Amino acid sequence: MWRPSVLTPSGLEHIANHKYKAGKYTPLDNLLNPWWLRMSEALPIWFAPNLVTLLGFAPLLVTYVLVWFSSPDCSTPPSRALAAVTSVALWFYQTMDALDGKQARRTGSSSPLGQLFDHGCDCLATVSQHSAVYSVLCTGSSPWTFAGLSAVQTGFFMAQWQEYYTGVLRTSFGPVGVTETQYVVMAIALTGFLAGPEVVQAFSQGPSAFQLPWLSAPNEPFGVVFSQGWVVFVVFMVVICFVKTIGHIIEEKGVKGVAPAMKDLLPITVMNVLIPLWNPAMQLRAPRLLILLNGLIFFYLTAQMILFSMARMPFPAVQLLILPYAALVRRSWTLEPDVMYTLLLVYTLAIACWILLWLSAVIEELKARLGIYAFSLAKPSLRQEKKKKSN
């Protein structure tokens, strides 16, 4: 099967010598770390770290599909059972996400492929986490529903962009980080279980007791105001990340290093400009499909940033797949919603197929250079020798 060539020979060599540097732990990370260590020691020694990641991610995929079908318009709250399952799935993923790195160190199998797989799944998981939260907020096709996902995935991209230029992946700011955010998401899903769908819908779609200055309209629903607060929080974190990274670049390379770094932000900036420009009729017709498409494109951009950071290769600032997206945004104002839905579905499937093809190419290139398997701790040479002996 044809696959695109993604990595250069020098990029593969850089990846082979890459060492991951994590940022600081938060107090909650330190509190949970003994529990995570005990859990990792309970895993079978033959269990590959990427299997740990995949095992944790699978329930999120299931709950994402269930939430999609139970609330295709993003306005219907989940049943108690679905909210409970979603909350447990989120906790299970967060736990497995904390264990995969420990399992890799325990088995001596840490690799750049594991980093790509782990952080790639984290990026995709934000789509499911967004779905879980907004199923409780019941914001429907409000622009803030789409802004919520754009915010979290832009924040994720910016963290990888910062690692590209500093060599360190910072996952927290002071006492607040990824773990704390994940537990807030779990708490929101758990609220859907404890309160029940009727109470959730009445509260989320009822007028909020407070509004955000310059953002909230009078009697704005609570779910929308909560989403506005979330977007403001993430934008604040993104600005801090941007300022700190630019400061580091100037310190290391001088002012001349700023332009290439700014160029890398072009695709993510274009996406954030285009997303609010969709025809509201299209957002009302297919909110879930639009959210999925946005999530896939953000994932593809972020996966490239992760990979090219390890490979020390230039990040492609010109992303051709955004051109059809821009064309669809433009045509959403002139074509009938049903016609647009068909085009949107075809484009989403095309993007998904391209991402799978791209990922398979990257995985095969990394496996060949590193001499490893993606989901097994066995070495390819040992398996080949066993096959020869059996024959």
Image (cartoon, rainbow, N blue to C red):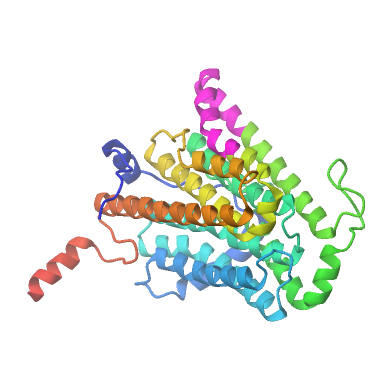
Point out the stretch of residues depicted in magenta. Answer: 244-270
Is residue 376 or residue 360 the one in the foreground?
A: 360
In the rendered image of this protein, does residue 82 appear above or below residue 14? below
Q: Is residue 370 visible?
A: yes
**Residue under the image location 67 percent in, 77 percent down:** 84
Using residue 39 as the reference point, say whether residue 279 is left or right of it: right
Instruction: Indicate the quadrant containing the C terminus: top left, top right, bottom left or bottom right.
Output: bottom left
Give whichever of 239, 271 is nearer the camera. 271
Is residue 260 magenta-colored?
Answer: yes
| Principal secondary structure, stretch drawn in magenta | helix
Residue 196 lies, in percent from the top left, at 78, 77
Residue at x-position 26% and y-position 38%: 9
Residue 83, position in %: x, y? Answer: 68, 74
Quarter-wise, where is residue 352 in the image?
bottom left
Q: In the picture, residue 117 is in which quadrant?
A: bottom left
Residue at position x 60%, y 53% in the image: 25
Q: Residue furthest bottom?
A: 81
Q: Position of residue 326 (x, y in %)?
A: 56, 40
Name the residue: 53% across, 37% down: 267
